[in-house]
């Protein structure tokens, strides 16, 4: 359930939000972000300290894409104006939003996990005092193979997408890079370890 715009504004006045941790999962299309997140969901079933954020996207949900909430463009714009999102961004001709109650998750000392665009990392660093960026990567030939298998884009569009991804580099002590070129369980366990550390940090913050 989304919190009201009034509550959202009250939280925004006390930025950065502390206590918990926001785990931002980023990486190029085809790297397997949803696969790694799905592995962690299964690994931590019933873990109350973790919230895997359900995104709102201006795209219909289907079996070939992530499980998300859908809003038409006009409804998304209205929700944004009403303060329904903690953060939103545009990518690939679509609009993406994270529900505003993500802020409450972090403020209450829990760990929020979300698939986001690398372009919003600066905004996340300003919004959340404790940010962990997990960059899921894969070898260029693996990315190209996975994107081609989707059948959504032409070869030229796939190559252009890969070129854009290669030009973006993330740095900083809060960044962890995980190669997902091979067995998904290997990458999944590395991601699970990041989440364990985030939960341990949140537990300690509650004691301060």
Image: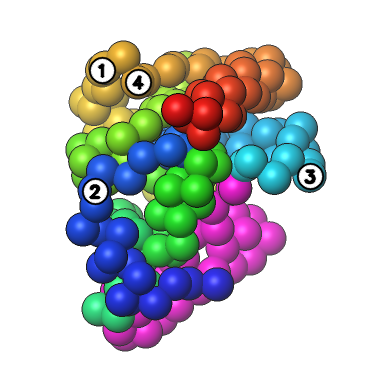
The quarter of the displayed image where residue 42 is located: top right
Labels 4 and 2 touching (C-beta < 8 A): no
Labels 1 and 2 touching (C-beta < 8 A): no
User: Is 137 contained in the magenta span?
Assistant: no
Q: Which residue is mark 3?
A: 46
Residue 194 image offset from top left, x and y in percent: 55, 21
How far apart are labels 4 and 2 at the CA level?
18 Å
Say whether disc 2 or disc 3 marks the residue closer to the N-terminus: 2
Q: Which mark is residue 132?
A: none
Residue 74 image offset from top left, x and y in percent: 31, 85
Residue span colored magenta: 51-80
Q: Which mark is residue 174?
A: 4
Q: What residue sits 21% from the left and 26% below the top? A: 167
Q: Which mark is residue 15?
A: 2
The 10 Å Cα crowd at callout 3, few under 14, some 14 to 19, many 20 or more, is few
Vertical comparison of 5 with 177: above or below: below
Say whether disc 4 or disc 3 marks the residue closer to the N-terminus: 3
Which quadrant of the rendered structure holds the C terminus? top left
Query: Which dot, 4 or 1, sits closer to the camera?
Result: 4
Say whether disc 1 or disc 2 marks the residue closer to the N-terminus: 2
Q: Secondary structure at mark 2?
A: loop
Vertical comparison of 51 with 122: above or below: below
Looking at the picture, tell me which residue is in the foreground, 125 or 62. 125
């Amino acid at each position: 359930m989304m919190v009201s715009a009034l509550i959202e504004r009250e939280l925004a006045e006390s930025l950065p939000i502390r206590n918990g941790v926001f785990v931002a999962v980023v990486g190029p299309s085809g790297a397997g972000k949803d696969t790694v997140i799905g592995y962690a969901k299964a690994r931590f079933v019933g873990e109350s300290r973790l919230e895997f954020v359900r995104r709102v996207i201006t795209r219909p949900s289907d079996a070939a894409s992530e499980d998300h909430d859908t809003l038409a463009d006009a409804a998304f714009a209205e929700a944004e104006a009403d303060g329904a999102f903690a953060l939103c961004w545009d990518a690939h001709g679509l609009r993406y939003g994270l529900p505003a109650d993500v802020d409450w998750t972090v403020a209450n000392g829990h760990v929020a996990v979300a698939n986001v665009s690398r372009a919003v990392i600066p905004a996340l660093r300003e919004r959340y005092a404790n940010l962990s960026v997990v960059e899921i990567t894969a070898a260029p030939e693996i990315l190209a193979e996975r994107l081609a298998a989707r059948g959504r884009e032409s070869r030229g569009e796939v190559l252009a997408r890969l070129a854009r991804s290669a030009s973006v580099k993330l740095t900083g002590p809060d960044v962890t890079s995980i190669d997902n070129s091979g067995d998904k369980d290997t990458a999944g366990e590395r991601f699970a370890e990041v989440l364990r550390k985030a939960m341990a940090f949140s537990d300690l913050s509650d004691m301060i």
